[in-house]
Image: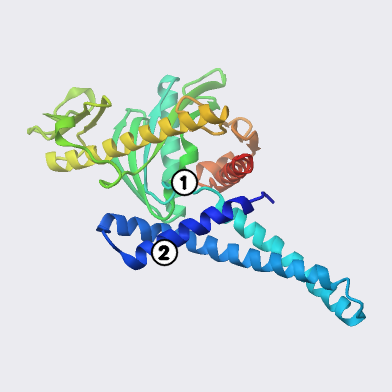
Amino acid sequence: MINFEKQFDNIESKFKEIENNLNNQIDLDTEKLIKLNKEYAELTPIVETIKKYKNDKDEIGELSKLINDTDPSIKELAETELKEKKKSIIIIENELTKLLIPKDENDKKNSILEIRAGTGGDEASLFAADLFSMYQKFSDLNNWKFEILSISETGLKGIKEVICNISGYNVFSKLKFESGVHRVQRVPSTESSGRVHTSAATVAVLPEAEEVDINIEDKDLRIDVFRSSGPGGQSVNTTDSAVRITHLPSGIVVSQQDEKSQHKNKAKALKILRSRILDNEIQEKNKQRSLERKSQVGSGDRSERIRTYNFPQGRVSDHRINLTLYNLAEVLEGNLNDLINPLMTDEETNKLAELGNE
């Protein structure tokens, strides 16, 4: 058990301050009121558990004195109750541990999923299509809504690039571990000699940003409109419905041309742009935290090779936690929990270790 007792006074003091502000509500605008109510709701179960912990601690202290009583019946009763209280306080300590682990504020958000074929030519685009199908099936299994925002396909049923919006319960908390380089080892269908090839695709999972998360001013945007084009450059629309938005401060560029309506393409492009700006901010914070702590497991670095899918052996290996599973067929059918759950546990363990060092 990590020694959290030194944090109790600060937590209880902050809770009391929030409680007083909410009771008085002097000079509180709507935004401030919403923020205070959210903080109050988050701290309430922690404060209640701290009270239970302190009460049990006090009772253990009293019972420890009673076991030295000269009356055998009192001594026996005290020993029995002390044993029960010690069991009880271990349960409360575990509750506190879970409650005090820092929460990722983006875990409850929906996600923007981006998959791009990497090195490996046609085989890389076919692998990108496999990953796309895998995440679509995983979304179905979780009852999440899966919407394609844009897609660029090859003539061989492969995918050069696809951007999707996935919405539902705690989407980002599970999918955030998928960001990075995914590598495949298999014999391509075009390979006559049976030689195993290695290809790759990159996956980026961004928390979907709402307007309240990222405020984009019109002066920071350059919006260009142009005529949509399909494979080979042929026009798929006679009007300038395609949209390219450049965010001048960051240099981020997003293009959308899948819809026939310029308005719809602009709305989709802005949704992706907001999420990429938010993701940039998160990556910068993670980078800073990594420098401060000297090390960080699972940084989410887009260039980090995170997983290998080996078809000849039916093997999936996650390189971040040295996990190897021999259920490749199941994984490709969207059964990702055996990969994601250990990563979630690993994240929790690292956060606990960080707390213990503070």
| Kind of residue sitting beneath label 2 | Glu
Q: Is residue 102 above or below residue 40?
A: above
Circle 1 — which element?
A: loop
Q: Pointer 2 and pointer 1: residues touching (CB < 8 Å)?
A: no
Which quarter of the picture shows residue 233? top left
For disc 1, the neighbor class at 10 Å (few under 14, some 14 to 19, many from 20) is few
Judge by depth and name the residue closer to the eye, 158 or 301. Answer: 301
Residue located beneath label 1 in the image: 104
Q: How many marks?
A: 2
| Kind of residue sitting beneath label 1 | Asp
Residue located beneath label 2 in the image: 19
Who's the residue at 48% across and 37% down the image?
178
Q: Is residue 140 above or below residue 190?
A: below
Sequence order check, earlier mark of 2 and 1:
2
Whether residue 14 is visible to the viewer of this picture, yes or no, is: yes
Whether residue 307 is visible to the viewer of this picture, yes or no, is: no
Q: Position of 227 compared to 322: left or right?
A: left
